[in-house]
Image (cartoon, grey):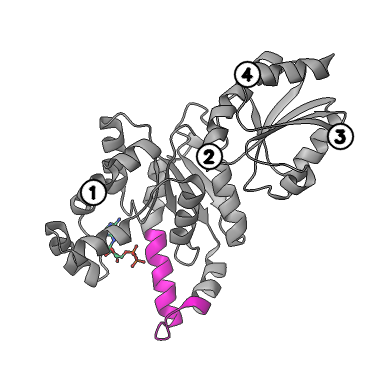
Amino acid sequence: MTVKQVVLLGPPGVGVKAQASELARRWSVPHVSMGALLREAIAKPSDIGLEARPYVEARELVPDALVMKLLRRRLEQPDVMLNGWVLDGFPRTVAQAQALDQWLAAVGLPAATVVYLKVMSGLLLNRLWTEREPDETMPMLRRRLERHEAEIAPLLEYYQPPGSETDPDGPAQLKTLNGSRSFAEIASELAQMGSEETGAARTIRDEAELDSLLARESLLVVDCMASWCGSCKQVAPLIDRLAEAYGDRASIMKIDFDTNRQISKRFGLKGMPSVMFFKDGELLETLTGVKPYQTYSAALTRFLN
Ligand code: ADP
């Protein structure tokens, strides 16, 4: 994904807000939470806040036009416009989803990536039961889930019209992730989405994949980077260029440090980014920090001979 604009959706009990906050932290982009925007507007109080207040107090949906106005004000701010965002609590209706898409198109931004954290409702009831307020009963929790299901179904259909999964030209806007895993596992998978760039150098999933590459590839170059690291962003395109130039003679890949922290100790990395050159599974050289393209290509050529 070139621009980090992510909408996180999921049922109650899956920790959508906490995941959104964690993802925004890892990517160093603003976290925009509709619930928080509304609470802020009400506390101030602003005109929008005064209008929204009775709905929020009744825990009913605030009218679409009102929430969209509030969201647009936030998304129009420069930090968000430049860096992207992770959004939770929005959209809750198809009209809101359409309004967001229309606004993004109008300001010339690409469509957002929508991620749905899917969990079986049986599992969710268990989780909600342990986290519930003391006065919440099982029927109340069931109703909360039913309300979510009624709300989410048309949204999922909007982002992925039936039949579009198999259409290669169809919108690949919706990603469904297994939300029944641990918080840390989900957080890693979400953060990884940002490193699936379209560049020529593919991203290695995990250490197991790295091990099999080390056993298989005679010449392997691995750029270890992290989404929060500024200089990694300078090196990534050079590694892509290297992959384009030498991809037929060597394997040139990236690996995300955040989801594979143990490799730092394993290979004695001293900083980020670290570009490692392996020959027959053995680490021969590590280039740390930003180097000119020629330094990477010269190292590679040396090992090719
Ligand atoms: P919850 O929905 O779990 O109560 P939130 O903090 O997400 O918690 O939202 C609090 C309230 O704000 C909701 O009950 C609703 O009144 C309002 N609200 C939040 N997001 C939206 C939205 N996208 N559209 C309309 N109303 C919203």
Within 10 angstroms of label 2, few (less than 14), some, or many (20 or more) residues? many
Do the residues under discs 2 and 3 have CB atoms within 8 angstroms?
no
Find numbered disc 2 in the image and state the secondary structure of the residue it sits on.
loop
Whichever of labels 2 and 4 marks the residue nearer the N terminus, that label is 2
Q: What residue type is labelled 2?
A: Gly
Q: Name the residue under label 3.
A: 215
Percent across and percent down for residue 171 are 44, 33
Within 10 angstroms of label 1, few (less than 14), some, or many (20 or more) residues? many
Q: What residue type is labelled 1?
A: Met
What's the distance in space between the residues labelled 4 and 1, CA to CA?
Answer: 45 Å
Find numbered disc 3 in the image and state the secondary structure of the residue it sits on.
helix
Residue 97, picture quadrant: top left
Find numbered disc 4 in the image and state the secondary structure of the residue it sits on.
helix
Whichever of labels 2 and 1 marks the residue nearer the N terminus, that label is 1
What's the distance in space between the residues labelled 3 and 4, CA to CA?
Answer: 27 Å
The correct choice, above or below, for 130 with respect to 14 in the image is: below
Do the residues under discs 4 and 1 have CB atoms within 8 angstroms?
no
Q: What residue type is labelled 4?
A: Tyr
Q: Mark 2 points at which residue?
A: 194
Label 2 or label 1, whichever lies nearer to me, is 2
What's the distance in space between the residues labelled 2 and 4, CA to CA?
Answer: 23 Å
Q: Which of 140 and 19 is in front in this view?
A: 19
Task: Specify the label residue 68 is tagged with.
Answer: 1
Residue numbers of the magenta segment = 130-150
